[in-house]
Image: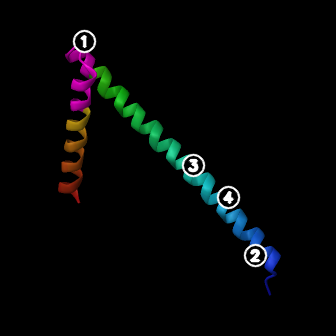
């Protein structure tokens, strides 16, 4: 039979593992996203030096829309 104290310890360990994994996944997703933005920025600056933040934001918005369209047509 399980013991109430042991159940609480197991639940806490599970919660800690879940929290740590969530934090690691979040960090990895942010790191990946920043990397993608850096790549887009580098290519954009090559094509149009001196671009404003507003113009660059439009480039990012267009990129996101293209990715959504591709994802929707693939699945």
Give neighbour class at mark 2: few <14, some 14-19, many 20+ (Cα, 10 Å).
Answer: few
The residue carrying pointer 1 sits among few (fewer than 14), some (14 to 19) or many (20 or more) residues within 10 Å by Cα, namely few
Q: Which residues are magenta?
A: 44-59
Q: Is residue 49 magenta?
A: yes
Q: Earlier in the sequence, mark 3 or mark 2?
A: 2
Q: CA distance from mark 1 to mark 2?
A: 60 Å
* Image: 22 above or below 8: above
Q: What SS does tag 4 mark?
A: helix
- Which quadrant of the rendered structure holds the C terminus? bottom left
Q: Is residue 8 above or below residue 53?
A: below
Tell which circle, 1 or 2, labels the residue nearer the N-terminal end: 2
Q: Position of residue 22 (x, y in %)?
A: 55, 53
Per the model, the C-alpha gap separating discs 1 and 4 is 47 Å
Using the image, determine if residue 69 lies above or below residue 32. Answer: below
The residue under label 3 is 23
Question: Cα distance, mark 3 to mark 4?
Answer: 11 Å
Give the label on residue 50, or none. 1
For the view shown, which residue lies furthest in the bottom direction? 1
Horizontal side of 9 relative to 22 (left or right) equals: right
Q: SS at mark 2?
A: helix
Disc nearer the start of the sequence (1/4) = 4
Residue under circle 4? 16
Distance between mark 3 and mark 2 Cα atoms: 24 Å
> Which residue shows up at 23% across the image and 37% down it?
61
Residue located at (61% from left, 56% from top):
19
Q: Residue at x 35, y 31 (%)?
A: 37
Question: Horizontal and vertical percent for residue 49?
Answer: 24, 12
Disc 2 marks which residue?
A: 7
Label 2, label 4: how far apart the Cα atoms are: 14 Å
């Amino acid at each position: 039979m399980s013991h109430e104290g042991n159940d609480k310890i197991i639940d806490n360990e599970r919660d800690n593992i879940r929290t740590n994994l969530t934090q690691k996944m979040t960090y990895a997703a942010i790191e990946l996203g920043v990397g993608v933005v850096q790549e887009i920025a580098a290519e954009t600056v090559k094509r149009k030096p001196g671009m404003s933040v507003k113009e660059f934001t439009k480039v990012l918005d267009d990129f996101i829309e293209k990715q959504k369209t591709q994802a929707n047509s693939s699945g």
